[in-house]
Amino acid sequence: MFVGVALAVACGTDSGADGDGPAETSSSSTTDTGSGTTTTESTTEAADTSTGAPPGDGILQCTEVCTVPLDCCVFGTAGCPGAYPYNVDCRDGVCVPPHCVEDDECTGAGEVCRPVRGVATCVTPCADDPEVCTPLGASLACVGTTDDGVSICFERCDAPGVFCGNQTCDPETGLCVCTSSGQCQVNHECLD
């Protein structure tokens, strides 16, 4: 009689786009006791903490489309894709702009890394001093907000000198918006 043969198989699949996200792990074991076979399977799934593609927010904008991350790089940029600020990505056929992970990556005076429309971005907080935006650019004002409610310097499309091209300036959000991909430049589509 053949007793106690066990086979264990474990494999993980990366759920984070850059290899840092938690993985889903599956395992199974089979035991042949001679009189029958018993199979036990288990799955453990951890929450995905990766910087996934930005979530849709109902605002249609001309967005760069891609097949691979290199498609999202400005042509000829050395080190792209790479480490921040060149860590562009291509997720679900859409370019994800460079995203910071910690404040130390932000090089501008007073900048911090905060989520804006689903992407961690280097921004300048301004709630304590709205005038901090003026030296950064004539069209910047303390009118933006991060996803977690921090007031930041933001360039609205209706500020003097800002041009939306074929798109339209949405006065409610201050963003250049589109209604069709025909308003977008080559390799861009009008997407949420």
Image: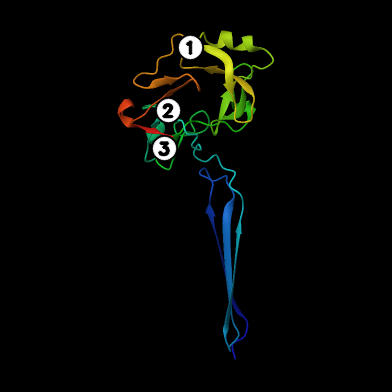
Disc 3 crowd rating (10 Å Cα; few below 14, some 14-19, many 20+) is: many
Marker disc for residue 159: 1
Q: Residue at x 48, y 18 (%)?
A: 171
Q: Of the residues under marks 3 and 2, which one precedes in the sequence?
A: 2
Read off the residue under disc 3: 94
Q: Of the residues under marks 1 and 2, which one precedes in the sequence?
A: 2
User: What residue type is disc 2 on?
Assistant: Ala
Q: Of the residues under marks 1 and 3, which one precedes in the sequence?
A: 3
Closer mark to the observer between disc 3 and disc 2: 3
**Image: 62 above or below 158:** below
Q: Residue at x 55, y 39 (%)?
A: 51
Give the quadrant of residue 93. Answer: top left
Secondary structure of the residue carrying tag 2 is loop
User: What residue type is disc 3 on?
Assistant: Val
Q: Check the picture and name the quadrant holding the C terminus.
A: top left
Percent of width and height locating residue 67: 37, 41
Marker disc for residue 16: none
Q: Check the picture and name the quadrant holding the N terminus.
A: bottom right
